[in-house]
Image (cartoon, helix red, strand yellow):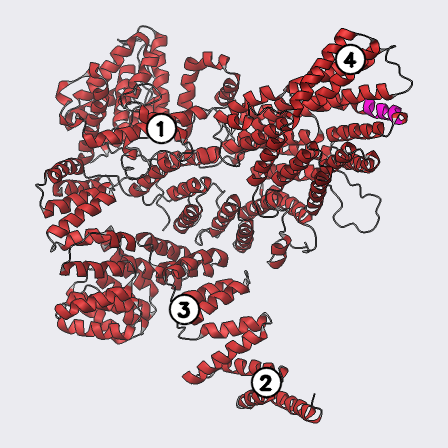
């Protein structure tokens, strides 16, 4: 097997044909398969040979049999992590995972936690890892995996804490540090990121993770050309390095090189079709090119994969809202979804209110303006949105003859300078007038 | 970042090329004799020369033949020598056992090339001119060998070993001991694989048999077995032809697999590299094939080939496009969508699409507007007109933004297509709501007017861009539009004198003629992507044809026509798309003649299409032409012949749901059921016709009209006049709503017929007159004649005093009725004529009996062919009465017996030979 794979690798380089890659195959696979299958039939096979047999079968493409063989292998010898990870790569749905007939063993918990993570069941994965941490309390691996799960749940603060501790325990760790750099990037911690980059550079600069961290640093610095160089290096070291493709796509978007960005994102998506960031990036790139309808396809994909992320819904809504499409009903639906899933910057509420008022749905608009106002008050934010909300509410209440409320909004508007103040004064006058009318001539 | 497109100069040495080199050595040995050793005559020698020439030309095709095939080909040309030649070939090949042998071989090869000063050559001496085709080939081989690394030489050597072994395992006579080592023992696991392989071969054979053209087969029939090994988990046989799955399984795996059609496969282990150009050529060939055959193209088999290809060539993005096409034509929406997006994400619309490269500026940006155009067409194809329009409008916007005029022209043409195909639905809402690219069209104007303006505008644009094929197809589109729409001046208000509501046949002919004319000088627009390899392969095939299939061509007229057409067209090699356009111009012509009512001309045009263009057009179009021909047979020759023809057509075209062939079958069965008086069956058939149409309003309008027209006819035949009139009335309303004026005329005629049958002639006359005026403005001559006939019948039923008027009406319509009408129409005319004579008071039967008897006899004969019991009984009844009057008792009895036969057949429809059980 080994010899065959070696030959295959060599041939892949030698025969590097005009199409970029050759169809070199491991010629030993056939004979290996024959031998191993007879061994398995006779029952004289050990768990490692089963593992090899599984590999051969997977290469051949007969996945069902490969799965059974690998399950046999791990059941007879559970400590072979390679077999577990091969098995994991063959479990692409929760149904197949549940159908596996595995013996109870603590290795199974590791396997399940890892597989849950791959299947984007982050909460389940997290609880499994936390359970395991109780037993293996000093394992860096488990700690890193917990950080990964938390990262996917977007708990950046927690992730940072975990990574700081991890680095204290193991200062030369490089694995998973790219994720830490992503967190630092998102939080815009220049110095911490540069410190991390320096550290991994000293440890091993030719690791894809190191290149990725350096790329992140340059990107944060706004030097996108340099960061592309480092992402490229990372990809040269590992062609299937998912996050580098996505991050490179982001860089190209920053550099306004949309077609290169599209290409990079697409590669990421083809490596792992569940990467919602890359789908989102694709959508963004097409939106930048003025093709909102085309972009919608990609946003739909990303939203499907990550339905609880308000940013994706907002991006999709903005596509619908774009002046070329003006599909406002659909945009409202998307904003509603966004508002329902923890929209941190409260963009969705504001847009919802605005769209409703544009479409003449005054009651709904008032409802959302009110909600937005409450939220701004709670977070003590000020700004043009506040003025807009107050203005609309004042006018709306006045037209509905709820003068008390209207007066409250108007008086609040008086605190602002500019044309709004005058309008508010005018409104107040009008309100008083009408109020008098109502008092004098009750209906 | 787009795919790495290497120049076509890539040339990899393969065992096949080595064998050609060996043959070249035989052809031109470095000796001094004019006719070298093994050859008996100069012509014999030349024969090999031509063969070698074709081989070298074809060596750029994707799949190289195996040694067996090569030997088989040699046998064809070699005559007595073949044994010697093939023997020599295998001996030489197997003697190449070490790298040094290869070095020596190529060294010797160099010797047969003449020097650069080739002008001082003896006449007798055979020297290969280095700049001749074969000489170039040899030089390329030498060069490829010289730049080869040692590893490469080793690979070549082992590949030659496999190449020989492959052939030896099949051909024991040439057994050579030292090469025959272990690997050939059949294994259990392998047997199943072989079987599957075999199944595919069988199916592809089946598939080939369905294709009339055999010059296109070359590529996929010897698809390498290696490509099919992987498909173990998937269900292999193609989806569409279920019946073929089982058959090959029954055949034992050792059935005659050496026949020529089951050509040998590439050695499974051998890794032959194809040049990029070869693969591209293969792919574009396959793309044509998919478009041509539609859903009958084997989905899974091709998909697995593409997957393999994609695995080994990740940078070749065209594969994604092929996968898109493949899923599109099998109505796999998610697959098509996914692959389309993937293709354009990777290639940015700059690879492989056969558009003229953009003039300037947009090279860096990518050309995503093409993606939009494709996406729009995909939605259109899969029946999402709303999305399609949305996408196409975006395409218009983006291509305007990038000033990509070519794409804009194509997009506008696509929108025209969309509007004319589905446009009669309620699309104004969509168009009104969204940003509409064509300025100056208010939302108030009807969709036809929009289409009209759009057509003219895109024609202008295409003309100014000199996109000749596009211009031609727009002309066709305009002709189609003119055919079914009354032209009125777009911006005319008030009672202007010039608003003549007419279609203009002359205009249509002019449009058709312009389009035809344009196609004839397509040459400067031939696409750049047409690859050398593809042409050379077909060239090679054609080279062999005169030898092999001259006899055959005499047997089969259809086939020979197209072959000769292709053969003589080889040097200029007309691109498929041009042929396609030409073909569709004939189809439009046939349609035009059909609406204008000249059956023979329509038939001739359909026939021209079926014989000359069915190879190059899509199978749907070909099926349409066949359907038309079958309809003519039914109308003019009776059902027996029509059903025989239908059987042939059914075998030819896979009968998928909603195919035109199925439609014709239902129509024929319905008509026959009506004529025979099987009313229940007729209703059933008519319902089946109705469910074929899509339930969405505004889509499949023609099918819907047809179904409800037939429904009304069935009700009429059952004497349920009220219901029939109600159905016809609602149909009229629908046609009016969707502006289908031509159909309106038919419905009016039907209404007149209903009133006539219900005995209410007075109220029927206005309908007939209205129909007449419709026909006049649309130039529907045949329909007009039949409306005249109905009018005459109506007059006649008002009483004998109107018989003269009716007679003169009929006589006026006779030329068209007899010249172009079908059997039913003709006999109806004859019967009515006879009735007129009989009714006329001044006419006496005894004086001139033949005036009445002759038409009746004619009518009865034709009606018997048609199996139209009702009319036939009427004819015989009249005949019997006339004979009775004349006192010819024997004849009277005979006619009466026939009358009785028909009337009983009509009253007791026998269900024994239920045609449904036979045909459905």
Q: Which chain carries label 4?
A: B
Is residue B31 left or right of B870 when viewed as pictured? left
Q: Which residue is tagged 4?
A: B854
Label 3 and label 2 in one chain: yes
Q: Is residue A131 left or right of residue A353?
A: left
Q: Residues within 10 Å of mark 2 (few under 14, many from 20)?
A: few
Residue matched to label 2: A419
B664 is higher (above) or lower (below) than B875: below
- State which chain disc 1 sits on: B
Q: Residue A310 carries which label?
A: 3
Which range is magenta? B802-812
Q: Distance between the residues labelled 1 and 4?
A: 57 Å
- Circles 4 and 2 in contact, beta carbons < 8 Å: no
Q: In this picture, is A323 found above or below B560?
A: below
At x 59% / y 85%, what residue is drawn?
Answer: A419
State whether discs 1 and 4 lie on one chain: yes
Pointers 4 and 2 within a single chain: no
Chain letter of the residue carrying label 2: A
Query: Which residue is pictured at 41% across the width and 83% down the height?
Result: A379
Relative to B197, B152 lies left or right:
left
Q: Nearer the viewer, residue B118 or B1?
A: B1
The label nearer to you, 3 versus 1, is: 1
- Distance from disc 1 to disc 2, alpha carbons, whole Å, reads 83 Å
Does the image show residue B618?
no
Which residue bears the numbered disc 1?
A: B246
Are discs 3 and 4 less than 8 Å apart at CB?
no
Q: Do the residues labelled 1 and 2 touch (CB within 8 Å)?
A: no
Task: Verify whether residue B447 appears in magenta.
Answer: no
In this rendered view, identify the residue nearer to me: A414 or B178: A414
Q: Counting other residues with Cα less than 10 Å from the Cα at mark 4, is it few (<14), some (14-19), or many (20 or more)?
A: few
Q: How far apart are marks 3 and 4 (CA)?
A: 86 Å
Report helix, strand or loop for mark 4: helix
């Amino acid at each position: 097997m080994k010899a065959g794979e070696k030959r295959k690798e060599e041939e892949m380089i030698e025969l590097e044909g005009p199409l970029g890659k050759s169809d070199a195959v491991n010629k030993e696979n056939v004979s290996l398969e024959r031998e191993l299958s007879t061994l398995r039939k006779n029952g004289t096979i050990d768990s490692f040979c089963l593992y090899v047999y599984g590999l051969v079968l997977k290469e051949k493409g007969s996945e069902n049999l490969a799965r059974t063989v690998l399950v046999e292998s791990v059941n007879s010898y559970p400590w072979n992590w390679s077999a577990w990870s091969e098995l994991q790569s063959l479990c692409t749905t929760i149904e197949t995972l549940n159908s596996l007939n595995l013996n109870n063993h603590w290795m199974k918990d590791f396997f399940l936690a890892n597989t849950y993570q791959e299947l984007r069941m982050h909460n389940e994965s997290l609880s499994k890892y936390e359970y395991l941490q109780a037993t293996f309390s000093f394992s860096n691996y488990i700690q890193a995996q917990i950080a990964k799960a938390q990262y996917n749940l977007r708990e950046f603060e927690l992730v940072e804490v975990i990574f700081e501790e991890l680095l204290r325990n193991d200062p030369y760790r490089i694995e998973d540090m790219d994720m830490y750099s992503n967190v630092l990037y998102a939080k815009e911690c220049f110095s911490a990121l540069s410190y991390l980059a320096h550290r991994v550079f000293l440890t091993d600069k030719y690791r894809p993770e190191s290149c990725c961290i350096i790329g992140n640093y340059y990107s944060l610095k706004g030097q996108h050309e340099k960061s592309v160089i480092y992402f490229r290096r990372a990809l040269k070291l590992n062609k299937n390095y998912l996050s580098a493709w996505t991050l490179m796509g982001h860089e190209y978007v920053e550099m306004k090189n949309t077609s290169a960005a599209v290409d990079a994102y697409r590669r990421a998506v083809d490596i792992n079709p569940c990467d919602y960031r890359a789908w989102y990036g694709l959508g963004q790139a097409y939106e930048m090119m003025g093709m909102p309808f085309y972009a919608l396809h990609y946003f739909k994909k990303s939203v499907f994969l990550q339905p609880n992320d308000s940013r994706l819904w907002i991006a999709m809504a903005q596509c619908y809202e774009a002046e070329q499409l003006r599909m406002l009903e659909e945009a409202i639906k998307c904003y509603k979804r966004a508002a329902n899933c923890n929209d941190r910057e409260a963009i969705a509420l504001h847009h919802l209110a605005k769209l409703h008022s544009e479409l003449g749905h005054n009651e709904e608009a008032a409802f959302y303006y009110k909600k937005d106002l409450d939220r701004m008050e709670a977070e003590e934010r000020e700004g043009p949105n506040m003025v807009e909300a107050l203005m609309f509410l004042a006018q709306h209440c006045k037209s509905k003859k709820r003068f008390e409320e209207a007066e409250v909004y108007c008086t609040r508007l008086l605190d602002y300078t500019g044309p709004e103040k005058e309008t508010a004064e005018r409104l107040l006058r009008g309100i008083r007038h009408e109020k008098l009318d109502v008092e004098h001539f009750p209906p | 970042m787009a795919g790495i497109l290497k120049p076509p100069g890539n040339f990899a040495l393969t065992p096949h090329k080595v064998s050609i080199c060996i043959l070249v050595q035989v052809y031109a040995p470095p000796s001094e004799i004019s006719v070298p050793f093994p050859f008996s005559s100069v012509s014999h020698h030349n024969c090999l020369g031509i063969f070698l020439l074709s081989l070298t030309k074809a060596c750029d095709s994707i799949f190289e033949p195996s040694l067996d095939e090569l030997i088989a080909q040699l046998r064809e040309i070699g005559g007595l020598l073949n044994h010697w030649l093939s023997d020599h070939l295998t001996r030489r090949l197997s003697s190449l056992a070490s790298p040094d042998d290869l070095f020596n071989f190529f060294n010797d090869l160099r010797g047969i090339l003449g020097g650069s000063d080739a002008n001082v050559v003896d006449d007798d001496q055979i020297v290969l001119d280095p700049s001749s085709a074969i000489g170039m080939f040899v030089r390329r081989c030498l060069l490829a060998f010289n730049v080869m690394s040692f590893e490469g030489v080793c690979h070549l050597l082992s590949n030659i070993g496999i190449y020989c072994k492959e052939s030896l395992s099949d051909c024991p006579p040439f057994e050579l001991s030292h090469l025959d080592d272990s690997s050939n023992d059949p294994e259990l696991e392998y047997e199943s694989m072989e079987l599957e392989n075999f199944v595919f071969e069988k199916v592809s054979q089946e598939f080939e048999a369905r294709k009339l053209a055999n010059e296109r087969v070359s590529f996929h029939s010897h698809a390498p077995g290696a490509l099919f090994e992987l498909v173990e988990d998937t269900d292999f046989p193609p989806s569409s032809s279920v019946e073929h799955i089982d058959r090959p399984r029954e055949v034992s795996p050792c059935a005659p697999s050496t026949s020529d059609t089951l050509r040998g496969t590439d050695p499974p282990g051998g890794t032959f590299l194809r040049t990029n150009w070869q693969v591209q050529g293969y792919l574009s060939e396959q793309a044509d094939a998919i478009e041509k055959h539609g859903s009958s193209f084997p989905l899974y088999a091709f998909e697995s080939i593409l997957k393999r290809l994609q695995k080994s060539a990740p940078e070749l993005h065209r594969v994604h496009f092929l996968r898109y096409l493949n899923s599109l034509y099998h109505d796999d929406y998610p697959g098509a969508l996914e692959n389309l997006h993937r293709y354009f994400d990777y290639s940015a619309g700059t690879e492989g699409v056969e558009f003229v490269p953009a003039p300037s500026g947009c090279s860096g940006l990518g050309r995503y507007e093409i993606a939009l155009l494709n996406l729009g067409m995909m939605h259109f194809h899969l029946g999402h007109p709303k999305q399609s329009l949305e996408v196409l409008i975006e395409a218009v916007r983006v291509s305007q933004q990038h000033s990509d005029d070519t794409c804009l022209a194509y997009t506008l043409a696509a929108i025209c297509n969309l509007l004319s195909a589905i446009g009669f639905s309620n699309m104004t809402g969509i168009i009104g709501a969204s940003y509409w690219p064509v300025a100056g069209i208010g939302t108030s104007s009807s969709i036809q007017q929009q289409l009209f303006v759009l057509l003219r505008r895109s024609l202008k644009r295409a003309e100014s861009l000199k996109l000749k094929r596009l211009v031609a197809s727009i002309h066709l589109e305009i002709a189609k539009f003119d055919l079914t729409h009354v032209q009125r001046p777009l911006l005319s208000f008030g009672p202007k004198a010039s608003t003549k509501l007419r279609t203009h046949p002359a205009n249509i002919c002019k449009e058709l003629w312009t389009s035809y004319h344009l196609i004839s000088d397509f040459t400067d627009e031939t696409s750049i992507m047409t690859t050398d390899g593809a042409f050379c392969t077909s060239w090679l095939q054609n080279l062999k044809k005169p030898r092999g299939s001259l006899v055959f061509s005499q047997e089969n007229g259809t086939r020979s026509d197209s072959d000769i057409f292709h053969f003589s067209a080889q040097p200029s090699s007309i691109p498929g798309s041009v042929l396609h356009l030409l073909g569709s111009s004939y189809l439009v012509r046939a349609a035009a003649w059909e609406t204008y009512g000249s059956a023979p001309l329509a038939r001739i045009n359909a026939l021209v299409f079926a014989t000359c263009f069915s190879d190059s057009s899509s199978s749907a179009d070909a099926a349409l032409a066949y359907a038309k021909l079958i309809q003519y047979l039914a109308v003019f020759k009776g059902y027996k012949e029509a059903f025989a023809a239908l059987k042939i057509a059914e075998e030819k075209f896979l009968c998928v749901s909603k195919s035109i062939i199925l439609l014709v079958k239902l129509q024929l069965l319905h008509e026959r059921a009506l004529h025979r008086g099987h009313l229940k069956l007729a209703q059933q058939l008519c319902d089946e016709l109705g469910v074929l149409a899509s339930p969405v309003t505004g889509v499949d309008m023609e099918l819907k009209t047809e179904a409800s027209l037939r429904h009304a006819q069935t009700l009429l035949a059952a004497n349920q006049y009220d219901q029939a009139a109600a159905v016809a009335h609602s149909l009229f309303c629908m046609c009016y709503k969707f502006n289908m004026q031509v159909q309106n005329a038919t419905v009016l005629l039907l209404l007149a017929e209903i009133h006539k049958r219900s005995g209410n002639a007075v109220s029927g006359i206005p309908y007939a007159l209205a129909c007449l005026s419709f026909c006049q403005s649309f130039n529907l001559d045949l329909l007009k004649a039949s409306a005249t006939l109905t009018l005459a019948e109506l007059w006649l039923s008002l009483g004998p005093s109107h018989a003269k008027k009716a007679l003169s009406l009929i006589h006026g319509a006779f030329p068209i009725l007899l010249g172009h009408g079908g059997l039913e129409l003709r006999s109806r005319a004859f019967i009515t004529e006879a009735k007129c004579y009989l009714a006329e008071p001044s006419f006496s039967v005894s004086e001139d009996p033949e005036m009445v008897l002759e038409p009746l006899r004619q009518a009865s004969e034709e009606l018997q062919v048609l199996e139209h019991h009702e009319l036939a009984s009427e004819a015989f009844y009249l005949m019997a009465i006339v004979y009775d009057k004349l006192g010819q008792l024997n004849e009277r009895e005979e006619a009466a017996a026939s009358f009785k036969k028909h009337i009983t057949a009509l009253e007791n429809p026998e269900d024994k030979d239920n045609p449904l059980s036979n045909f459905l």
